[in-house]
Amino acid sequence: MRQLQLGGVWVLVLAILAQPAIAQSERYPTATELQQLAQELRRKIPDLQASGFYSDRRTFEEWQERSAYAEAWADVDPAIAPFLGEWTAIEESLHIYPATARGGVCILDVYQDESKLYTGQVRDGKLYTDQNQVFFLDNNFLGNAAVYDNQPSFYEYAHPRPLPNLSEDLGQYYPETIAAFEASNCLVGLPQ
């Protein structure tokens, strides 16, 4: 019984280590590394879709609302529009909002009981963050490329949903992060 308990602890430790963390990447991935990671995500998408974790669970109304939001922003800042929305993973979500600077976004990264605000700039169809991460798109999937221990890797998110109401849906759980969001050059709602 003791060995079984210790084995379970190791499984738990390994599972925790495998999860994405809200940490800053050492550096941006190189162009070659990004290309390799994008190819790896493309190969992995059929398995992700079959896994059940990355099934498209959006309602038609959610799909419509997020699409209308992205289209409205595409008229103002076409570079950021494909990235906007709430992207989900197994235990993490990214809420990508427009920023006042052209090509800029604000990202709320919510992971279990933690949250963090960081910013990004879209260049050449990829979203570069101030955390040395690069987000890239493949259909309804978003890859988050980063480098830890000099090893490039990615984590995937899928099927963008409409952005939640900040104060009602997120403010009660992450008040410091939402306060930082509101104090920054982040935008909510449709373009004016």
Image (spheres, rainbow, N blue to C red):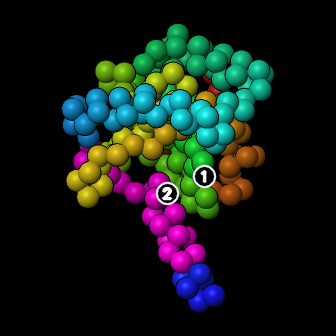
- Please tell me whether residue 22 belongs to the stretch shown in magenta: yes
Image quadrant occupied by the C terminus: top right
Which of these two is toward me, 147 or 132?
A: 147
Rendered position, 147 above or below 41: below
The secondary structure type at the circle numbered 2 is: loop
Position of residue 86 in the picture relative to residue 74 (left or right):
right
Task: Residue at 40%, 24% (x, y): give it.
Answer: 103
Which of these two is toward me, 39 or 65?
A: 39
In contact (CB < 8 Å): disc 1 and disc 2: yes
| Three-letter amino acid code of the residue under disc 2 | Gln
| Three-letter amino acid code of the residue under disc 1 | Glu
Reading the image, the residue beneath label 2 is: 19
Q: Which residues are magenta?
A: 7-28
Task: Residue at 54%, 35% (x, y): give it.
Answer: 47
Task: Residue at 68%, 49% (x, y): give it.
Answer: 170
Please provide percent x and percent y for residue 177. 56, 54
- Please tell me whether residue 128 belongs to the stretch shown in magenta: no
Reading the image, the residue beneath label 1 is: 91
| Viewer can see residue 180 | no
Q: Real-space Cα distance between discs 1 and 2?
A: 8 Å
